[in-house]
Image (cartoon, rainbow, N blue to C red):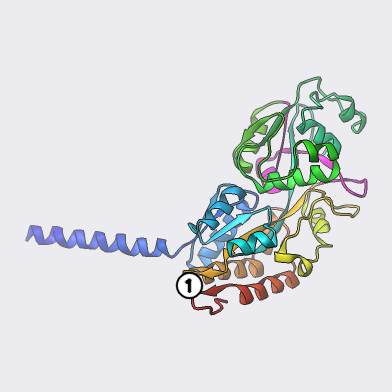
Amino acid sequence: MQIKRVVKSLIAVVGVAVSFSAAHAADMTGAGATFPYPIYAKWAEAYKKATGNGLNYQSIGSGGGIKQIKAKTVDFGASDMPLKAEDLEKEGLMQFPAIIGGVIPVVNLDGIAPGQLKMTGDVLAGIYMGKITKWNAAEIAAINPGVKLPAEEITVVHRSDGSGTTFLWTDYLSKVNAEFKTAVGSSTAVKWPVGLGGKGNEGVAANVQRIKNSIGYVEYAYVKKNKMTYTMLKNADGQFAAPDDANFKAAAAGADWSKAPGMYLVLTNQPGKITWPITGASFILMHKTQADAAKGKEVLKFYDWAFKNGGAMAAELEYVSLPPAVVQLIENGWKEKLKDTSGKAIW
């Protein structure tokens, strides 16, 4: 009798484990960019409450996201560096933008308040090439009259992993400074002449917060969350802009996604009086042929829900939601490009 009770208990435990595994197995999996992680986490929590379906997203950097989707180990990859149309074709992938945000210079300087320090692309390029090494250098002092700058060495912080945030940062600096373009270039991972690395936006934010007289670059949600000291930045119209969703929105306003092959569009250094010059979209990558059509459709349902219900959550974190016309363009692309193994559209 005792043995029967034990066996029944074991069966009950195994049954719970199996049902839990089945529920867990139904969760979508994604990996990649740390830039959109704060909003994806917020959306995922709300979506689970609304539908019961979960998202397991690994914030590992854009380079990791591209590798994982190519290897088919996740349902979708996420990257802040869009792939060019020819690369998408070669890998059998399609991509679409999911959210827009800004990359922000952040500093740790005693006596300097958020937004008090001004920067230009040329000065940032000089710092990240190791040519401007002190905070009271003439190049920084010239654009910051009346600001008390310390006579201290600048500690440069950059990403150590393959990163779409680095892509946006280096793309901008390459556009505004020819020497930076030649010496360092633009990519998700570059050979930095100076500085120390941090993994993810989280790692860069932590290093800048920890190290006095440092400078780094992070997505704006990390600035808000960690109450970091950001700088103003001179834009293409010669105005010093502040980082906020209105200025990210201004940078994205002229984007014509319908004419972008494979939806490849980089929004850095856009014209406009209030535009934030290091603005970018974060992209989702999926295989055109979906081996698990049900899982692929669940990913699309998640983003459809987020596009239609996630705007207020995005605004809270200073991200910019995509306009309805762009969402329609994206969802038309889902119908056209994403198929199951028999060639039937999954959306």
Residue 137 vertical placement versus 143 (above, below): above
Taking the view exactly as shown, the residue that stands out farthest to the top is 151
Q: Is residue 168 above or below residue 342?
A: above
In this rendered view, identify the residue nearer to me: 217 or 285: 285
Snapshot quadrant of residue 145: top right
Residue drawn at (36%, 61%), measured in percent from left and top? 21
Determine the secondary structure under disc 1.
helix
Q: Is residue 171 above or below residue 132?
A: below
Give the residue at x 92% y 49%. Answer: 237
Q: Which residues are magenta?
A: 213-242
Queried whether the magenta region covers residue 13, the answer comes back as no
Q: Is residue 241 magenta?
A: yes
Which residue is at the front of the view, 65 or 42? 65
Q: Quadrant of the C terminus?
A: bottom right
Q: Amino acid at mark 1?
A: Ala
Residue 129 relative to residue 298: left or right: right
Percent across and percent down for residue 303 are 60, 66
Which residue is at a point 19% across and 60% down the rendered structure image? 9
Q: Position of residue 134 (x, y in %)?
A: 80, 23
Q: Which residue is mark 1?
A: 294
Q: Is residue 56 left or right of residue 333?
A: left
Residue 322 visible within the image:
no
- Is 9 positioned to the left or the right of 60 in the image? left
